[in-house]
């Protein structure tokens, strides 16, 4: 998939999970970015349940779905709830994919930036 936030462009791959398939079927979509430490997230018109492997601890570059918030989250560093510098979600999230390029460009993203996600 292709993710565009303002002038930032990222490529990502979606995994073959129930939630990732729901997200894929909803594409293309547009939303507004929110920053939370080194995480961007944005609301999407998708509903999903927590999967068996949902967890809080993440890796840089993970693309996740936050079920309670109905949002996609992309992690590129520590968040306010990180314990030892690792990316960490506020609660368990479903891992749905991974950014395939340099995710550090997300440091330029700001609250309110428009985001477009489309099939790549």
Image (tube, rainbow, N blue to C red):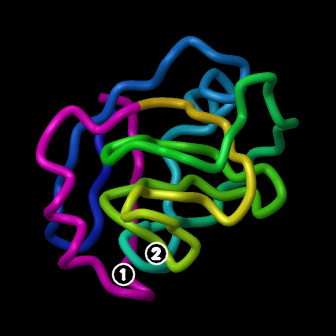
Q: Is residue 79 magenta?
A: no
Q: Position of residue 95 (x, y in %)?
A: 57, 33
| First reached walking from the N terminus: tag 1 or tag 2 | 2
The residue wearing badge 1 is: 113
Q: Disc 2 designates what residue?
A: 33
Secondary structure category for the residue under label 2: loop
Check whether the beta carbons of the residues at disc 1 and disc 2 lie within 8 A of each other.
yes
Q: Residue at x 56, y 12 (%)?
A: 16
Is 101 within the magenta? Answer: yes
Local SS, label 1: loop
Please, is residue 18 above or below residue 108 in the view?
above
Please report the residue visible at 33 percent of the width from the left and 85 percent of the height from the top: 110
Q: Which residues are magenta?
A: 98-120
Identify the image quadrant of residue 20.
Answer: top right
User: Could you tell whether 102 is left or right of 90 in the image?
Assistant: left
Is 12 in front, or is 62? 62
Q: Position of residue 58 (x, y in %)?
A: 49, 45
Marks 1/2: CA–CA distance: 5 Å
The residue drawn where x is 37% and y is 64% is 85
Name the quadrant of the N terminus.
Answer: top left
């Amino acid at each position: 998939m292709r993710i565009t936030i303002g002038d930032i462009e990222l490529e990502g791959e979606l995994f073959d999970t129930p939630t990732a398939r729901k997200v894929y079927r909803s594409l293309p979509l547009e939303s507004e970015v929110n920053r939370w430490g080194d995480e961007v997230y944005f609301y999407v018109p998708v509903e999903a349940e927590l999967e068996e492997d949902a967890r809080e601890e993440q890796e840089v570059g993970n693309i996740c779905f936050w079920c309670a918030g109905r949002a996609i989250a992309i992690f590129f560093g520590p968040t306010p709830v990180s314990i030892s510098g690792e990316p960490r979600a506020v609660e368990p999230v479903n891992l749905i994919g991974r950014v395939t390029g340099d995710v550090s460009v997300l440091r330029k993203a700001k609250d309110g930036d428009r985001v477009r996600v489309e099939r790549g």
